[in-house]
């Protein structure tokens, strides 16, 4: 799922250019080093104020043993990422996590924006294990394919953020209007999704269905109606193929949070077909606990 939401371009809001304020690109591109201890989106309190604080806890052997009871070391991303964030942060937005029980902590994380959960997870990695991340690389250049360890710097990760909660919204104009809930729908109000969409898609191997769940999670309003809407998958089924793909594309364009890829170069001495420098590549970071937090990743 995170693969599908990963941005392939920095061009954001391109399809939402039809309507006033929503057309403005108010997503801010920064780096992990600059963003520091602040969530890329944040958590609203009961008064509607946005809180961006993250306070991480020191991570010792006792924590490692406690976490080990909660998930196996080969757990899927959907299982271990929220558990680590829930247990290793003492403050998330307005919430004092240490005062809550396990179920309350998990609920708070499942209601956080995906961008914030991935960001907190990455920040925890940097705080506990340092900023260097070593990946095992196969050079993607045709004719090279050399395998070597490559060490990247997580502080340089691009992070897309917003200052205001309304900046997570965009408008999507349907190519094929549909009838939903007894009205003709010509456009949706869309929003960057929360973590619980990943939990809903967990273990689902049907790629189209995972995409449908992501689209379902991002549609929050019909036409210009102010009241929020939560469509069922059955209702999502009515979307035309161009709109199914179109909304998916706007999800990528409106991506928020850390872009989980490191830029690197192959070794010039082995990337033989290049005269100078090495072949540049973009590597996806492996979220798995063992590779992201393990000794072998350092
Ligand atoms: Zn190479």
Image (spheres, rainbow, N blue to C red):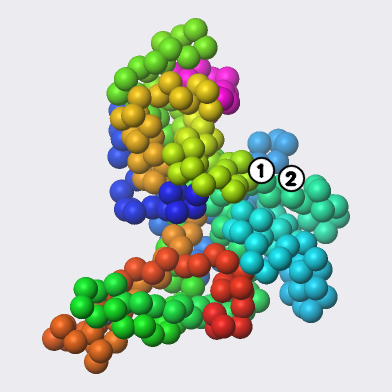
Whole-percent x, y for residue 185 in the image: 41, 15
Residue 256 visible, this orientation: no
Residue nearest the viewer, comparing 101 with 38? 101
On the rendered structure, is 91 left or right of 205? right
Residue 276 numbered tag: none
How far apart in space, not on screen, are marks 2 and 1 (Cα)? 6 Å
Residue nearest the viewer, comparing 147 with 173? 147
On the rendered structure, is 274 left or right of 113? left
Which residue is at 19% across, 87% downward?
Answer: 272
Which residue is at 39% across, 39% downward?
Answer: 248
Residue 107 numbered tag: 2
Determine if the C-beta at disc 1 is less than 8 A from ligand 1.
no
Which residue is at 52% across, 23% downward?
Answer: 234
Q: Based on the displayed image, in which of its 4 quarters is residue 88 positioned?
A: bottom right
Q: Based on the displayed image, in which of its 4 quarters is residue 74 positioned?
A: bottom right
Callout 2–callout 1 Cβ contact below 8 Å: yes
Task: Classify mark 1: residues with Cα within 10 Å, few (<14), some (14-19) or many (20+).
Answer: some
Q: Is mark 1 on a helix, strand or loop?
A: loop
Q: How many marks?
A: 2
Residue nearest the viewer, comparing 133 with 27? 133
Whole-percent x, y for residue 11 in the image: 31, 48
Whole-percent x, y for residue 124 in the image: 63, 68
Image region (quadrant) for ligand 1: bottom left
Is 231 included in the stretch rendered in magenta? yes
In the image, residue 63 sits, relative to residue 259, either above or below, namely below
Residue 9 visible, this orientation: yes
Determine if the C-beta at disc 2 is less than 8 A from ligand 1.
no
Say which residue label 1 marks: 111
Residue nearest the viewer, comparing 135 with 9? 135
Which residue is at 24% across, 92% downward?
Answer: 269
| Residues shaded magenta | 220-232
């Amino acid at each position: 799922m995170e693969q599908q939401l990963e941005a392939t371009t920095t061009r954001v809001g391109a399809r939402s250019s039809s309507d006033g304020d929503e057309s403005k690109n108010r997503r801010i591109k920064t780096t992990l080093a600059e963003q520091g201890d602040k969530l890329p989106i944040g958590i609203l309190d009961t008064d509607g104020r946005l809180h961006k604080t993250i306070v991480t806890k020191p991570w010792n052997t006792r924590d490692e043993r406690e976490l080990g009871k909660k998930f196996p070391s080969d757990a899927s991303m959907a299982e271990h990422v929220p558990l680590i964030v829930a247990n290793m942060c003492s403050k998330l937005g307005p919430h004092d996590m240490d005062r809550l029980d396990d179920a309350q902590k998990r609920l708070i994380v499942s209601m956080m924006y995906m961008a914030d959960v991935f960001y907190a997870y990455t920040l925890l990695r940097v705080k506990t294990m340092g900023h260097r991340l070593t990946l095992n690389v196969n050079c993607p250049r045709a004719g090279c394919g050399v395998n070597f360890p490559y060490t990247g710097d997580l502080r340089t990760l691009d992070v897309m953020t917003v200052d205001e909660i309304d900046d997570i919204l965009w408008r999507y104009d349907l190519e094929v209007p549909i009838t939903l809930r007894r009205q003709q729908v010509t456009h949706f109000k869309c929003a960057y999704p929360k973590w619980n969409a990943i939990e809903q898609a967990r273990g689902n191997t049907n790629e189209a269905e995972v995409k449908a769940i992501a689209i379902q999670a991002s549609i929050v309003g019909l036409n210009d109606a102010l009241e929020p809407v939560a469509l069922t998958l059955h209702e999502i089924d009515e979307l035309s193929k161009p709109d199914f793909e179109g909304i998916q594309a706007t999800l990528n364009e409106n991506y928020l949070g850390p872009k989980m890829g490191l830029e690197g170069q192959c070794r010039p001495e082995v990337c033989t077909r290049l005269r100078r420098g090495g072949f540049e590549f973009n590597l996806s970071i492996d979220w798995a606990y063992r590779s992201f937090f393990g000794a072998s990743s350092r």
